[in-house]
Image (cartoon, helix red, strand yellow):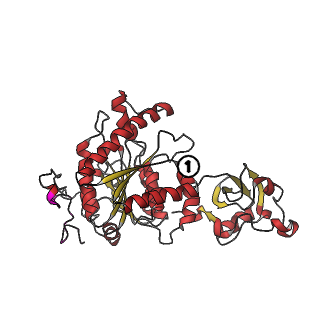
């Protein structure tokens, strides 16, 4: 495998500019002999190593100390490696840590569970976190830009496009985008849930070539890696490779955990984005030759940008319940949804909104862009096309704007 340190001045462990002489770079990660998370090679790792647009997500524990303060040394270590990769790649950072960083200044000893305190901690912590990111990148004469997103921003197509344009413009201006969920205004009903999922959505939003998920674990194991018989999983090509894998929840300051990271990695792969999962301590080799951690292969028949957004990011305005025959037609693909196959509707929505499509057993089978307002559609339910007025004979959801979950990994 060709690495950046072979022929190109891209190692995060050596100085690159005269202005940087005298800086303290972290010691290179020494590959432990026989350690299962190191020394891997594959075509997919080569693809990640040479990706031109990379989203890098860093977990809370990789940015903060035990006393819930932002650790400048940890951030410096990460920024050194990011800077090295930025010689030939665009980097978008998805940073956790706002709530955790606010806990220390507020005197909190455990992560808050009520929404108001969590948002207060995020409001305080976001300032400290952004300051440290800016200070660290300033060592390389780089400016950062903070991009705070809510699920509603990604859920509405116009706002998602606006966020995309903002990030693209920051990149054009040679500014490093630092993305985080806007915890200060997000509600429990409308939030990404964790920054792992946010990073997958952002990867899709910016058409990334790779996603690197960094936490405090060096890769995916089939059980707690502290157990002596835990097996390391180096490559995940399909859901079959996850058979028997038991992933845990988040830690002391984070909301993610391995289960969240696996879910986010599979989500990104549906959009055609390869994912490397490893620890922040291994960020050097992760961004150099991708020889560490676990790689999730992207789905070959990737979802289109619109279908990915509709299925996994869009706000939902209502629900259409189908009979069994319509479910079979919709899940087969290429078939528009007609009024005759709908048994009932729920919610108040306008034409052009995204709606959930569910079967007779209540299972959500997909989503689509509805062509009629809910009050109009209520009078069309169950009717054949020829029995409808001339202006209501279009499909309720056209095949081009209908996506189902049957193709998930």
**Is there any visible trace of residue 211 in the rendered image?**
no
Residue at (25%, 45%) from the top-left corner? Answer: 74
The majority secondary structure of the magenta stretch comes to loop
| Image vertical order of residue 111 relative to residue 385, above or below | above
In this orientation, which residue lies closer to the viewer: 318 or 349? 349
In this orientation, which residue lies closer to the viewer: 189 or 267? 189
Q: Quadrant of residue 5?
A: bottom left
**Is there any visible trace of residue 319 in the rendered image?**
yes
- Residue 128 image offset from top left, x and y in percent: 33, 39
Q: Residue furthest left?
A: 22
Residue at (23%, 68%) from the top-left corner? Answer: 3
Q: Give the range drawn in magenta.
A: 1-18
Q: Name the residue under label 1.
A: 152
Q: Quadrant of residue 18?
A: bottom left
In this picture, residue 153 sits left or right of residue 80: right
Q: Residue furthest top?
A: 107
| Image vertical order of residue 119 relative to residue 329, above or below | above
- Residue 276 image offset from top left, x and y in percent: 35, 60
In this orientation, which residue lies closer to the viewer: 29 or 70? 70
Q: Residue furthest front?
A: 173
For the residue labelled by badge 1, is the local secondary structure a helix, a strand or a loop?
helix
- Residue 116 image offset from top left, x and y in percent: 49, 31
Q: In which quarter of the image is residue 110?
A: top left
In this picture, residue 113 sits left or right of residue 360: left
Residue at (88%, 67%) from the top-left corner? Answer: 387
Is 62 magenta? The answer is no
């Amino acid at each position: 495998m060709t690495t950046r340190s072979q022929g190109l001045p891209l190692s995060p462990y050596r100085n690159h500019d005269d202005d940087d002489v005298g800086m303290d770079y972290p010691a290179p990660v020494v590959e432990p002999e026989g350690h299962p998370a190191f020394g891997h090679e594959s075509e997919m790792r080569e693809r990640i190593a040479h990706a031109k647009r990379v989203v890098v997500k860093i977990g809370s524990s990789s940015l903060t100390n035990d006393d819930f303060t932002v650790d400048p040394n940890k951030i410096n270590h990460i920024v050194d490696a990011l800077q090295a990769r930025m010689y030939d790649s665009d980097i978008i950072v998805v940073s956790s840590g706002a709530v955790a960083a606010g806990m220390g200044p507020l005197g909190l000893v455990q992560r808050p569970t009520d929404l108001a305190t969590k948002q207060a901690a995020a409001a305080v912590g976001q300032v400290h976190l952004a300051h440290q990111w800016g200070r660290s990148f300033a060592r390389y004469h780089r400016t950062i830009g903070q991009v705070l997103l809510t699920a509603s921003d990604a859920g509405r197509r116009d706002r998602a496009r606006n966020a995309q344009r903002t990030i693209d413009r920051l990149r054009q201006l040679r500014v490093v985008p630092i993305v985080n969920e806007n915890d200060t205004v997000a509600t429990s009903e409308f939030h990404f849930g964790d920054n792992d999922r946010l990073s997958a959505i952002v990867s899709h939003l910016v058409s990334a070539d790779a996603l690197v998920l960094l936490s405090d674990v060096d890769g995916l194991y089939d059980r707690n890696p502290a157990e002596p018989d835990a097996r390391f999983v180096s490559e995940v090509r399909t859901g079959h490779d996850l058979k028997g894998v038991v992933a845990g929840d988040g830690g002391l300051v984070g909301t993610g955990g391995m289960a969240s990271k696996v879910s986010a990695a599979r989500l990104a792969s549906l959009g055609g984005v390869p994912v490397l999962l490893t620890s922040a301590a291994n960020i050097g080799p992760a961004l150099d030759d991708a020889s560490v951690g676990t790689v999730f292969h992207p789905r070959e028949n990737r979802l289109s940008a619109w279908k990915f957004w509709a299925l996994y990011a869009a706000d939902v305005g209502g629900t259409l319940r189908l009979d069994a025959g319509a479910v079979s037609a919709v899940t087969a693909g290429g078939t528009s949804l007609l009024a005759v196959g709908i048994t009932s509707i729920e919610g108040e929505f306008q034409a052009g909104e995204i709606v959930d499509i569910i079967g007779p057993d209540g299972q959500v089978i997909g989503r689509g862009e509805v062509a009629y307002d809910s009050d109009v559609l209520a009078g069309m339910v169950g009717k054949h096309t020829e029995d409808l007025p001339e202006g209501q004979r279009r499909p309720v959801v056209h095949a081009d704007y209908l996506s189902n979950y049957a193709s998930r990994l």
